[in-house]
Amino acid sequence: MKVDLPILNAWATEATPPQTAAAGAIPHVVAWNLTQRCNLACAHCYISAGSWHSSRAELPTDTCRRIIDEILEVNPAPMLILSGGEPLLRDDLEQIAAHASAGGATVVVGTNGTRLTAARIESLKAAGVRGVAISVDSLDPAYHDRFRHGGGALEEALAAVEQLRAQRLDFVIQTTLTRGNRAELERLVAWAAEQGAVSFNLYFIVATGRAGRMQGLPPSENDEVLRDLARLQREYRGRLMIRSKCQPQLMRHVHAADPDSPLLNYETRCPCGVQYCRITPEGMLTPCPYMPVVAGDLRDSSFGDVWRTSPVFAALRAGSLGGKCGRCEYRKLCGGCRARAYAQTGDFLAADESCAYEPAGDVPVIERQREVTYGMAAPETMSWAPAARQRLERVPSFVRGVVTARVEAWARQRGYAEITPAVMDEVRRSLPVDFSKRMPFFLRPSPPPPGRGEGGGEGEGIDSRRRGSGSGAPANQDGGRGPDRVRGQGRGATLPRPRPRPRPGPLSMGDNASEPPTPASHA
Ligand code: SF4
Ligand code: SF4
Ligand code: SF4
């Protein structure tokens, strides 16, 4: 299962001076392939997982805890995607998740769903896991089971979806696109919406791992699919997020159809190495799950050291894009998939040739339209009451800047002198969200620690409210794409650490969570 965080965001462009490019380097999202073991053996698996791999190559629990602490030193509120292989095969998955969530991370799990029992969902929730991504490639068992190399895999995955819904843990449906399921796209999207998924993520093949033997669709067909996705994204706005993964070219179509699309609130470029990275089962740090370029070895180096000093990350943050991506007017909104460029050419800064677009080169670069997008830090310009700041600290780092800016803008317009929880509630109630669904986890703060209210007679965090939670978060569910640059941070900057939080207790029925706004663990 992949948890990829594709469209989140951004790195340097040729138009961006190196020092500026490096300034946004914050690991908002960390994908962690905890194991290469898997009970399935899918044709497209980027990590070549299978049942034959040994657990002996995996990092022990204590080392995982140490690495989590190092990540939290760099970013106290990251999103951590625990994946594999099949992460449910690790008996210590809950221990790892609990350590991360207690420390302040928003934890999600990517799984093929075949081992996701009611008891396991309960233990994941108790460990603070806020969402699960499930892979469903087709509603036709013959196709899904053949693609996944596992008889009965679809039936088990569908049962897992039903169970997640029953136990009120948010989930994402992830589908890998091939010619075999292309015609089923709309049906899968409709089904995901009916099931109550937070998001439908469509993955495009990157020729790495076992997928090195596969060919994705040709560029012209990819483009048609992206156009369809952009249309579906508009049709399902407010009900279901729809995203392309490993194809940031979607943003060209989104922008062309609606330059004011809320999707463009995100920093839409590939975030690898700037706001996103991946840890392999053996402890190597790479820019993204699909890019096997090692930036450092976490068995003998700290996460912070590798994040700050790796030449691989420096190149991604400061390097110029080559070929047509380098001269394309969409390079700030798209920029192509760096993993695909690497798979195709061995150069992660080369053009992404899966794209059908041929830029003329003499068109002005299309700039982002928002002052603050997801992933950016926004300086506080107003006074925040302690209880309001406490709420803000529980918002995942990649949306905190947007929340700050929106709440302050609301308060300023109304002449308020201070941001209080009541002001945040006002903002939340004002959001034109579809209240038939809960706000996805990453737009809500984490649950408050047991026994710690927020003052003002509350005791109920924004996150635990079922209607319209979000503390001034984006205006609808399209608003939470993912990381983006953080302004005002130095290279490899370390964010201020919030107060330590006790481990959250089991999530209540009312506050399930999540959509991995990106990274998928498998796909
Ligand atoms: S894609 Fe996911 S389910 Fe399939 S073999 Fe790889 S890890 Fe296992
Ligand atoms: S390199 Fe490709 S797969 Fe990796 S984060 Fe960027 S767009 Fe996604
Ligand atoms: S040429 Fe590159 S930057 Fe331009 S749309 Fe295609 S992939 Fe994106």
Image (cartoon, rainbow, N blue to C red):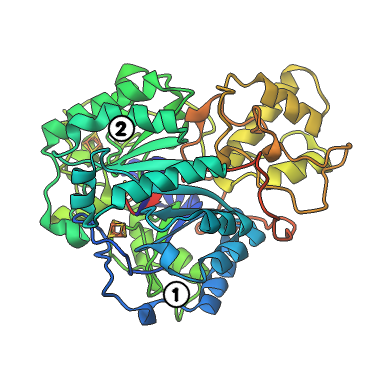
2 and 1 marks in contact (CB < 8 Å): no
Q: Residue at 70% x, 55% y: name it.
A: 505
Camera-nearest residue between 281 and 419 = 281
Where is mark 1, residue-wise?
A: 298
Q: Position of residue 354 (x, y in %)?
A: 16, 41
Q: For the residue labelled by badge 2, is the local secondary structure a helix, a strand or a loop?
A: helix
Left or right: residue 164 compared with residue 454: left
Q: Residue at 35% x, 57% y: name it.
A: 288
Residue 372's image quarter?
Answer: top right
Q: Position of residue 148 (x, y in %)?
A: 23, 54
Left or right: residue 122 compared with residue 338: right
Q: Which part of the image, by quadrant, shows the N terminus?
A: bottom left
Q: Position of residue 313 (x, y in %)?
A: 38, 60
Camera-nearest residue between 378 and 31 = 31
Q: For the residue labelled by badge 1, is the local secondary structure a helix, a strand or a loop?
A: loop
User: What's the amino acid at mark 2?
Assistant: Leu
Q: Is residue 232 visible?
A: yes
Residue 424's image quarter?
Answer: top right
Q: Position of residue 227 (x, y in %)?
A: 24, 25
Q: Residues within 10 Å of mark 2 (few under 14, many from 20)?
A: many
Q: Residue at 66% x, 19% y: name it.
A: 430
Q: Is residue 320 visible?
A: no
Pointer 2 or 1: first along the chain: 2
**Residue 234's disc number:** none
User: What's the amino acid at mark 1?
Assistant: Leu
**Residue 188's disc number:** 2
Q: Residues within 10 Å of mark 1 (few under 14, many from 20)?
A: many
Give the alpha-carbon distance from disc 2 to disc 1, as whole Å: 39 Å
Left or right: residue 362 compared with residue 95: left
